[in-house]
Amino acid sequence: MSAPDGDPDDHSDERGDRAASVGDVSPHVGAGLLEEEMGPSGAMAHLYRGEIHRMKYWRERLDKTTNWAVVVMAAILTWAFSSPGHPHYIILIGVAALTVFLVIEARRYRGYEIWRTRVRILQENVWAYGLDPDGGLVDPDWREKLGEDYRTPTLKITAEEAIAHRLRRIYLPLFAVLLAAWLVRITAFSPEPWVTAARVGVIPGVAVVATVAAFHLGALAVACRPRTWHAKGELRAEDLRKSRRD
């Protein structure tokens, strides 16, 4: 039987070199990843799929919060109108409960926006560019921004913007339903003047009405005031709205 080609010492040296290279990481590791001349690599595809998965998970968390808010609101309204003897302020308790859900959902929306921002960066600058290079890059510095975000993840929007977004999408209509139900409850179900019927215990009706009015006006102001939106919500684009109207 013939001996294998090569000197055994040569193989030992090769193994030693490989071991040394594993221990001493080259500063250029990953330098060739996603070269601009190349199409999206397998690593990028896995990265994109992972970000989509995390975005979907946080989207589901948002939906669960909304579902609970609707269930609680429906239960409170059902109980409030099931008997004329039930107090009207149970509806105001429902407003407070929805406010708690709004704050929770806004916190989750800020987390969701981290993953959606990354997904949109990849869609705009990798997949869109790969499909149509003539369209150019949306952001020429997207690599640096995405790399920095992976090094130091940060929240992309303020708490006030997150609350405004959830108010516009979900909670303003819910608050409007509760407000209408409360007004019906203190007017149509009470023989007293509605301002008097609005009292809660020792709190006079005028103070209750003023508090309710201030809360809803404040929510409307937060939701509708002019602002620069930082959330990567492509469905809010004016061009898309115009095309839908056309």
Image (tube, rainbow, N blue to C red):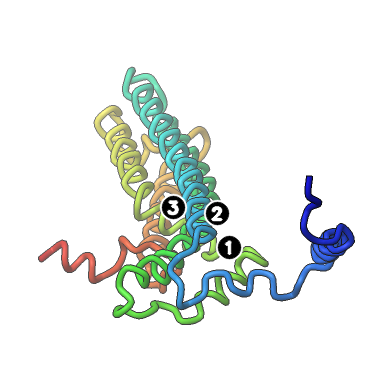
| Residue in the foreground of this view, choosing between 11 and 31 | 11
Q: Secondary structure at mark 2?
A: helix
Asked whether the beta carbons under mark 1 and mark 2 sit within 8 Å of each other, the answer is yes
Q: Earlier in the sequence, mark 1 or mark 3?
A: 1
Q: Secondary structure at mark 3?
A: helix
What residue is shown with label 1? 155
- Return the x and y of residue 110 as percentages of the image width and height: 53, 56
Q: Amino acid at mark 1?
A: Leu
- Return the x and y of residue 140 as percentages of the image width and height: 46, 81
Q: Quadrant of the N terminus?
A: top right
Q: Is residue 23 visible?
A: no
Q: Earlier in the sequence, mark 2 or mark 3?
A: 2
Q: Earlier in the sequence, mark 1 or mark 2?
A: 2
User: In which image quadrant can residue 152 be found?
Assistant: bottom right
| Residue in the foreground of this view, choosing between 48 and 70 | 48
Asked whether the beta carbons under mark 1 and mark 3 sit within 8 Å of each other, the answer is no
- Give the residue at x 82% y 63%: 14
What residue is shown with label 3? 215
- Return the x and y of residue 41 as percentages of the image width and height: 49, 63
- Residue 35 in the image: above or below residue 51: below
Mark 1 or 3: in front is 1
In the rendered structure, find residue 111 and report the number of the disc placed on it: 2
